[in-house]
Image (spheres, helix red, strand yellow):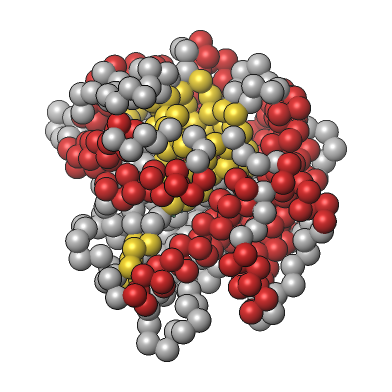
């Protein structure tokens, strides 16, 4: 094992999701997706989910940054930075506008043919997520989203069409983006974006979430099998939002509390990787009196459809303490997390922790022994244009530099098998959590504000030239 340097074929690139940048929400037959019915929030509040598209509301994803019509210009900029890969998603509602059709929409398929060709022309490998918070909205109103077993078949049809159509253009795939966000089922945001779940008053939110997650895990495992049958060279991964939860102190109760909270967020990975549920989840469901619809056929499917690699996002870490009296280690993600005095937070309260990335890479390796792919990492911040048009985003460079250093240590010192690194929002786009444009992640600035004003003009930030030399030196010069 060579102990210096990242692998020669390391996949440097950037990541986005269709709904956050394409716009063109009704172009070429596209149907309405869950992202099309969410308004703008703020640093402290999630976005509002409306009943369909309501007149007078502003929906930032409808136009986004109009990548649909400008992708050639944008991909040329990615190529200028030296990207080896580009992670995006296929907007499900471009291919199946309502989600339950039998035949796909040819105009939607054609768009991704052209987009992937454009990437390949520049020697950029497309890395594709099938479901990234953009379920057709019709599947919510007609079927209740993934609470309904029928969604498995709709997803599989979509996945199979994509695998078949792009089998010579796309090698790297992921099934469900950040499938574990919905561990936060107390809020409306994650269950809606992950699973198209629109809760009614009085429902058992937690039970419904676990059932939906199960159907997604089965759908994912079926997709893995179908994909491998279509092209054995495909690499098909899961996608997990990793936010490590540390014990607030070394008090044994805090340590155990952190472990239990981690289990609640990360058992999804065990199912993707090992093909079955860990005992702690089965016991937890028993204790809660939850009986899930899990058939023997589902169990077989999970076993046969395990993933090739673990894709994950990493932005921040959290901490937790055991509350007095919480002797069954109940975990409520929206109220139980506490601040960590040893790290600073972004303007959105995300706690910045580069060493946490090395910890994550080691922890995932220890648990799962699979190749890893950092498919999101980055710093959402307000940027300021100088009178001469330049944008000096040193804070973003600083964030990425410190994370890349830790990533390198994990490979060089710890022997982690890492496929690549695609920082989030390589071009400014609509925030998933808040709908803001002004929570920016990009190396490329896009002239547009939270209200939708702006020319959409693209310009290079200071981080653009910096990232270019990071890639050309294969991470040696940061
Ligand atoms: P925004 C929560 C926690 C970690 C990652 O997020 C998350 C979320 C959901 O907001 O989402 C991922 O835009 C997601 C992307 C998203 C990105 O992180 O809220 O996969 O779609 O844009 C950053 O700042």
- Where does the image place residue 340, in percent across and percent down from the top left? 25, 65
Residue furthest to the top in view is: 121
Note whether 90 is above or below 291 in the view shown.
above
Residue 366 screen position, x and y as percent: 44, 47
Residue at 69% x, 79% y: name it. 289
Tell me which corner region of the image, top left, top right, bottom left or bottom right, holds residue 234.
Answer: top right
Q: Return the residue nearer the eye: 75 or 275.
A: 275
Where residue 84 sits in the image (x, y, percent)? 42, 20
240 or 126, nearer to the observer: 240
Question: On the image, which quarter does residue 283 sit in?
Answer: bottom right
Q: Is residue 60 above or below residue 318?
A: above
Name the residue nearer the viewer: 232 or 375. 232
Tell me where residue 13 sits by quadrant. top left
- Pick out the residue farthest to the left: 387
Which is nearer the eye, 25 or 433?
A: 433
Give the residue at x 25% y 57%: 345
Residue 4 position, x and y percent, is 27, 24
- Taking the spot 50% from the left edge, 41% from the top edge, the residue there is 369
Q: Is residue 200 visible to us here? A: no
Q: Quadrant of the N terminus?
A: top left
- Which residue is pictured at 65% across the width and 58% down the height? 277
Q: Is residue 177 visible?
A: yes
User: Residue 430 vs residue 446: left or right?
Assistant: right
Q: Is residue 209 left or right of residue 428?
A: right
The mark tally for this picture is 0
- In the rendered image, the residue lying farthest to the front is 1
Look at the image and tell me in which quarter the C terminus lies: top left
Left/right of residue 364 with respect to residue 454 in the rendered view:
right
Residue 185's place in the image compared with 64, above or below, is below
């Amino acid at each position: 094992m060579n102990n210096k340097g990242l692998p020669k074929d390391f996949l440097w690139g950037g990541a986005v999701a269709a709904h956050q940048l394409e716009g063109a929400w009704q172009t070429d037959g596209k149907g309405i997706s869950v992202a099309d019915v969410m308004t703008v929030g703020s640093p402290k509040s999630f976005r509002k989910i409306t009943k369909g598209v309501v007149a007078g509301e502003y929906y930032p994803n409808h136009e986004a940054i109009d990548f649909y019509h400008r992708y050639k210009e944008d991909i040329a900029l990615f190529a200028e930075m030296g990207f080896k890969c580009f992670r995006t998603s296929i907007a499900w509602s471009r291919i199946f506008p309502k989600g339950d059709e039998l035949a796909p929409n040819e105009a939607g398929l054609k768009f991704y043919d052209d987009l992937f060709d454009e990437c390949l022309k520049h020697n950029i490998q497309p890395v594709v997520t099938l479901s990234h918070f953009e379920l057709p909205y019709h599947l919510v109103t007609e079927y209740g989203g993934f609470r309904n077993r029928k969604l498995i078949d709709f997803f599989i049809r979509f996945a199979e069409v994509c695998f078949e159509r792009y089998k010579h253009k796309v090698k790297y795939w992921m099934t469900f983006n950040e499938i574990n966000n919905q561990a936060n089922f107390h809020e409306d945001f994650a269950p809606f974006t992950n699973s198209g779940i629109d809760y009614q008053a009085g429902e058992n939110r937690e039970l419904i979430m676990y059932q939906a997650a199960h159907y997604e895990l089965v759908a994912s495992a079926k997709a893995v099998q179908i994909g491998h049958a279509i092209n054995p060279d495909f690499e098909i991964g899961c996608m997990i939002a990793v936010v490590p939860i540390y014990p607030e102190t070394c008090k044994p109760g805090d340590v155990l509390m952190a472990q239990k909270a981690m289990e609640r967020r990360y058992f999804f990975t065990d199912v993707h990787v090992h093909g079955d549920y860990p005992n702690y989840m089965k016991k937890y469901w028993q204790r809660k009196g939850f009986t899930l619809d899990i058939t023997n056929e589902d169990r077989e499917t999970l076993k046969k459809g395990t993933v090739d690699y673990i894709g994950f996002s990493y932005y921040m870490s959290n901490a937790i303490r055991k509350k007095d009296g919480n002797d069954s280690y109940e975990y409520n993600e929206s109220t139980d997390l506490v601040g960590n005095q040893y790290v600073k937070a972004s303007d959105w309260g995300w706690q910045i922790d580069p060493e946490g990335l090395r910890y994550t890479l080691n922890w995932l390796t220890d648990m799962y022994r699979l190749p890893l792919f950092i498919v999101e990492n980055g710093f959402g911040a307000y940027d300021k244009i100088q009178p001469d048009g330049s944008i000096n985003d040193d804070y973003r460079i600083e964030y990425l530099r410190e994370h890349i250093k830790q990533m390198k240590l994990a490979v060089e010192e710890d022997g982690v098998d890492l496929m690549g690194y695609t920082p989030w929002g390589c071009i400014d786009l609509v925030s998933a959590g808040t709908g803001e444009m002004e929570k920016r992640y990009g190396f490329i600035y896009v002239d547009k504000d939270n209200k939708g004003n702006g020319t959409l003009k693209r310009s290079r930030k200071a981080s653009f030239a910096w990232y270019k030399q990071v890639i050309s030196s294969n991470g040696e010069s940061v």
